[in-house]
Amino acid sequence: MTRSLAPDQPPSPPAEPDAGPRYRDAGELADHVLGLLTLDEKISLLHSDQAALPRVGLAAFHTGGEVLHGVRVEVPCTVFPQAVGLGASWDPDLLERIGDAIGSEVDSLLQRDRHQPLVSRNVWSPVVNLLRDPRWGRNEEGYSEDPGLTSSLAVAYCSGLRGAGPGERPARWRIVPTLKHFVAYNHETDKFARSMDLRPRVLHEYDMVPFLEPVRAGVVAAVMPSYHLLNGRPNHLSEHLRLLRLHDPDLAVVSDGFAPSDIIDKSHYYEDREHAYPAAMRAGLDSFTDHWGDPTITVRALRDAVARGLLTEAEIDAAARRLLLLRARAGDLDPHREPVQDTVGAPAHRALAREAVRRSAVLLRNDGTLPLADGPGQSVAVIGPLADRCVRDWYGGPLPYRVTPVDGIRARAGGTVVYESGLDRITLRHRGDGRLLAATEDGGVRLTDVTGSDDTVFEVFDWGEGGICLRSVGNGMFLSWDRGGELPGGGRREILRCDREEPFGWEIRQTFRLERAEADGPWVLRNVYSGRYAATDATGGLDLMAPDAGSALALDVEVLSLGAETAARAAGAADRAVVLVGTYPQINGMEGHDRQDTGLPSGQSALARAVIEANPRTAVVLVSGHPLSVTELAERAPALMWTSHGGQEFGNGLADLLFGDREPTGRLPQSWPRSADDLGDILGYDIIKSRLTYLYSDREPLFPFGHGLGYTDYRLGPSVLDRGTAAQDEVVTVSAELTNTGARAGEEVAQLYVRALDSPVPRPLRQLHGFRRVSVAPGARERVEFRLPVRDLAYWDVGRGRFTVAPGRYALTVARSAAAAGPGAVLTVVGEPLPPRDLGSRLVRAVDFDDYHAVRLTDQSPTTGEAVTASGPGSWLLFRDVLIARGHTGMVLRLGGPVLDMDAVDAGVAPSGGAAPPGRLEIRLGDPAGGRLVAVAEIPGEDTGRYSWRTVTVPLAPVDGRHDVYLVFTGAGRLASLGLTAAESPGGHR
């Protein structure tokens, strides 16, 4: 969530220059300032809007400013392509340069005015959540579905923001980046209420990686938790935050907007702030972003918690010091700051934005239609609803200027350029009296008897599941919901306006649906945002007050022209055609709502099909912040290119590619599914069990991860290893010869994939372990080499709680995409065999299973621990290769009775009567159904509460050797931990 403008406040007094000694480092300065503060002053620092403390020379400060792909501020700054587009560049150097440009613009804005409410030296970027499911509403904000690619791009971007290269440790940071949103956040549906399950292997091998790597690299100093619940607990209370602090104890944790209150008001995890806020701080939270611009509620809650003994001053000190250190690192505690050159909108940044468009577009298919032929005698038709638009998204700032695709093509083309929107044109006629809906010059909407006027004609933008937008041909504005005057009984009227230049805002009010109950019945116009229908008011005017279709204005829709037909005529008359179709940020998914479908809106599909049929030399450009399931276009389009929404230089950068002035070098940062049916449940975060993402999926994608073409051809030779065997502490080299077999120079992205052939646990079918950009001249060949530390082949060993490299064979392949990762060269890793699973020396967490069926993960207590819950018979857990010795005579289990159900737990409802009946927990060997039964435990049946646990020890039948152990639930129940006991220790594990 982004910050909102705070209420007007008087300017803070300037910080007084420090008259004391200079400090060795930022940490010493932070300690000095902390020692000067009273308890109340320290508490005041824990809100995102820190008031000035003139007594000790501290100026006002606030955390947070959005810089996802440009500075999100109303002063027009440079806007680069969306983050997912930058991810498609596969170019860390580009990301570092973009980070440097954005960081310098933040620096310039703060030099102009230190107290700008939307700009801070602590910025809330980048988003490093992995793009697990392309239906996620915020897919456009992330880089990739791969943890390694995401990490390398994030490290580079943060290095640029910070103002020093990767590996450097500057004494002063220009900007302090914040990673968001910790951790495993990929859905918007019910995110405040429903808990997601994340097993330890997926946490450590997948979702944690892009957070840990930038922290280890020292390029970030803050992290932001996500809103949603994980394993039963809100992420702002996550015990996993401590894993980051193991690598940087000074890492600041800042909350997302209103998230501290959401713990109480939306997730219902705690009943009051006095208990919720100390719990959040003990989990790691330092800065409370709550009630924009008004710290009083937060400060009062923290003071009360200290007064009641729920929070200690030492805990306040630790959080305040981390926030002071963040400011000290950025030089905010030092009044002597050197002036910088103002770079906002600098020509070099505009050129970089154009380069970013070029390097982020991906050529998916091409039969030779691209690059476009050019010359005085050539003509090109530019078609589509996105051909004349540069679209702004929620986390991008206002574009300082807009070079649309048709603008860029016109500027570049040597011949004739014809533009056609491809939009249907309609009128909406009142069925009762025949009057037409009309837009007025001042942005109003009325019914009129006048016919033949552009004021009564609307263009229809089809955004599929997002609805339609209606743009007046008369005034060029979009139809929108708005609030009108006061109603006599209170409240305000809801009215129709036609005064918006583009759909934009936290609440999109410009989408509608035309609906009718019967085939020959009247149409009604429903606003998607409000759910209300257009109707006539008491004076004969128009409003949006009808609560249902029965009381709505009855309309006849008259089609004046079909956009597909008009576009086909334009395309057929041209030598070449370029059609731009896709989706719209905020309409087709954004923060707050996910996509249900992955296809192209049907009207746009029909448009592209009509243009291709009219002109076989058509290039289709897909513009979106997410993959699109365009199976028909993937087969029929002569040329197919994808790009994210590209910012201010979109048209120029795109034209550079379409005319062949630059080579397409982008590669897909996530695989494209053939349909949404290939994706499973968007709430299923266990990519191992669900076999999702390119790592585990055995479904054939429409386009694979890493795919991308250029305007030349390549041949990649076999992968070669410098040795056939290696120990776990060694480094191997794998290489392949890349030949440019085409007629023009090009740049290929060589990708190294690994597959474990003898793994004791399920491993990825292919996993990226490195990539290199290689420029190759026509007819030339280059040998591409990768150095791979064997330790990078590790997986998370749940039995030992650490990463482990398993001895055995690994296939290493240098390829051009994940789909091309064939058998490769085989490396044999030598080492000691993996030991059996140890359940005898300590209690083992139930969540550290190897496999499972029909269980959920939940919180063991409000603050620490995770457990497993089973809703009924047939649920089981598997612990592989457990060593059971003859001396083991029992099993100790920490059990809990059934809760009401997991949906109740998700909603924060305390369990009460009506829980599913308890049963037994059976311990079986080899198979969950027919395996040998060696122990049985009764699950507590009484209503003991969600956090009530009972430790029991049950006898174990004589067993000897290594076995796969199944824990099978015959009814509802919970399990926190388990272990084996020996005869000499009857007390078992405690």
Image (cartoon, helix red, strand yellow):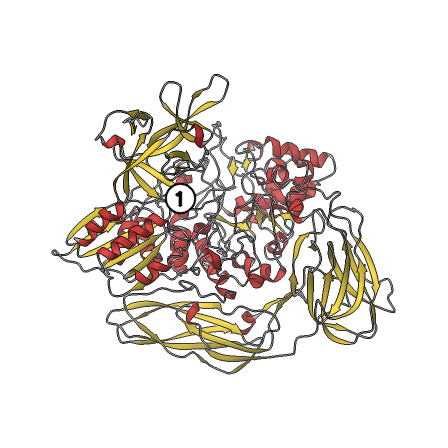
Residue at the limit of the structure toward the bottom, as seen here: 724
Asked whether, in this view, residue 724 is left or right of residue 951, the answer is: left
Is residue 31 in view from this perspective? no
In the foreground, 456 or 832: 456
User: Which amino acid does the dot numbered 1 rest on?
Assistant: Asp
In the foreground, 270 or 869: 869
Asked whether, in this view, residue 456 is left or right of residue 958, the answer is: left
Task: Give SS at disc 1.
Answer: loop
- Measured from the top left, where is residue 724 in percent x and y? 51, 83
Asked whether, in this view, residue 558 is left or right of residue 525, the answer is: left
Q: Quadrant of residue 675?
A: bottom left
Q: In this rendering, is residue 14 above or below 334?
A: above
Residue at the location (72% across, 34% down)?
A: 307
- Measured from the top left, where is residue 352 in percent x and y? 32, 53
Residue at the limit of the structure toward the top, as seen here: 488
Q: In this rendering, is residue 766 above or below 628?
A: below
In the foreground, 289 or 216: 289
- Residue bearing mark 1: 393
Q: Quadrant of residue 912?
A: top right
